[in-house]
Image: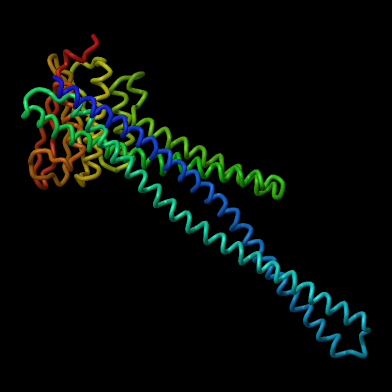
């Protein structure tokens, strides 16, 4: 239809414009981050220089006091000292006074520069936060347009139903993206920026203080090990590679053991039926459902114990996850319940079902069914 084609063209141009805007905002954000890191490095070096000047000023103040006492002594005992002695004492006191004035002037300039840099850092932090928020909003709008308006067809009621579901899913996805972005920004990004600063500092120390340079290198090794752990955790959260190599059960077992160690919540894993490798999509989906459910228990349930039961049936794969937490009043999944919404969407995409039973102070049970015949490899 002509109207449909015209609308599709408008949407396509809008999406393209949004993509370009997102790239521009991202470049601004990255430029601000680079400037922020450069200023932070300069600020660190500046602070070291100020500290050294402050020490030198204190030394000169002591020397100046001694020179003034010497000048007073030779001036009072005029008959005891020669004219040359008086001249030398006077010149020494004057020389120290001039040197101290120069240092104080430099110290004042450096302090002023430090204040300017600190104010600039605050301004850049605000710019980065605003740019990140703007990128998130542009992504939401772009995904909304791509997910809904590019396929406008069919009956109005069906369109509205898809529209409402897409908004919920997009919000859930954006929350996950923001969480991941925060993890990368607060973890690897900060680690790399700090690493660059420490490497540059070590380079400077190699010519001045080899012992401290070795200490910095030891600290760098520890930082790198810690940074690698953070990166591995993020990669594991994105997709645990052991699922492809070892399968679902070993990966879930490992995850639950780590979860118990991290949270203190006792989780029992119960596997029933004839185990078999499933299609990769099904194994990843089941793992994500268990991961999301346990994260919800940790964040919201205030539970001490939980149970995960996985049943391999002939017609379906059944998953039951329960806890002894505070529970909640049963109601339809709302837009704010991103975790449950994400689980519901994953089940729907594989033609599965999910039921949630919960009551106040009686814990929560999640029942999930996925059709087996579509996932089993053989």
Q: Nearer the viewer, residue 348 or 40?
A: 40
- Position of 42 relative to 21 (above/below): below
Q: Nearer the viewer, residue 223 or 309?
A: 223
Q: In which image quadrant can residue 202 be found?
A: top right
Q: Is residue 94 left or right of residue 167?
A: right
Q: Residue at x 7, y 28 (%)?
A: 156
- Count of labels in the image: 0
Q: In which image quadrant can residue 266 be found?
A: top left
Q: Residue furthest top?
A: 378
Q: Residue at x 75, y 76 (%)?
A: 64
Of the 4 image quadrants, the one containing the C terminus is top left
Residue 58, image x, y percentages: 68, 70
Q: What's the image's color scheme?
A: rainbow
Q: Residue at x 59, y 42 (%)?
A: 199
Q: Is residue 93 left or right of residue 338?
A: right
Q: Is residue 13 left or right of residue 361?
A: right
- Position of 98 relative to 44 (above/below): below
Q: Is residue 150 left or right of residue 77?
A: left
Residue 328, image x, y percentages: 11, 45
Residue 168, image x, y percentages: 18, 36
- Position of 180 relative to 67 (above/below): above
Residue 194, image x, y percentages: 52, 45
- Position of 317 relative to 26 (above/below): above
């Amino acid at each position: 239809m002509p109207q449909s084609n015209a609308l599709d063209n408008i949407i396509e141009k809008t999406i393209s414009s949004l993509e370009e805007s997102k790239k521009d905002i991202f470049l601004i954000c990255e430029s601000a981050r680079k400037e922020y890191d450069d200023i932070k490095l300069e600020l660190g070096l500046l602070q070291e220089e100020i500290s050294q000047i402050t020490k030198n000023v204190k030394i000169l103040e002591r020397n100046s006091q001694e020179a003034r006492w010497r000048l007073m002594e030779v001036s009072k005992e005029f008959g005891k000292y020669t004219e040359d002695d008086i001249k030398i004492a006077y010149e020494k006191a004057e020389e120290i006074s001039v040197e101290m004035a120069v240092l104080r002037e430099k110290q004042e300039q450096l302090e002023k520069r430090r204040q300017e840099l600190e104010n600039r850092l605050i301004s850049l932090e605000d710019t980065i936060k605003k740019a990140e928020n703007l990128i998130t909003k542009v992504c939401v709008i772009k995904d909304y347009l791509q997910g809904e308006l590019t396929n406008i067809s069919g009956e109005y009621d069906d369109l509205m139903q898809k529209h409402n579901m897409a908004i919920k899913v997009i919000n859930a996805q954006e929350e996950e993206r923001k969480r991941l972005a925060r993890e990368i920004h607060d973890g690897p990004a900060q680690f790399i920026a700090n690493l660059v600063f420490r490497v540059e500092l070590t380079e400077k120390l190699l010519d001045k203080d080899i012992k401290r340079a070795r200490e910095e290198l030891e600290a760098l090794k520890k930082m790198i090990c810690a940074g690698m752990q953070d990166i591995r955790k993020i990669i594991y959260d994105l997709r645990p590679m052991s699922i492809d190599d070892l399968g679902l059960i070993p990966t879930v077992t490992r995850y639950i053991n780590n979860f118990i160690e991290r949270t203190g919540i006792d989780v029992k894993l119960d596997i029933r039926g004839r185990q078999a490798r499933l299609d990769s999509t099904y194994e990843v989906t089941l793992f994500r459902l268990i991961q999301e459910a346990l994260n919800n228990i940790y964040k919201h349930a205030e539970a001490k114990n939980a149970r995960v039961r996985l049943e391999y049936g002939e017609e379906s794969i059944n998953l039951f996850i329960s806890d002894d937490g505070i529970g909640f009043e049963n109601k339809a999944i709302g837009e704010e319940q991103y975790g449950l919404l994400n689980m519901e969407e994953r089940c729907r995409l594989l033609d599965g079902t999910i039921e949630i039973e919960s009551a106040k102070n009686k814990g929560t049970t999640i029942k999930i069914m996925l059709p087996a015949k579509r996932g089993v490899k053989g």
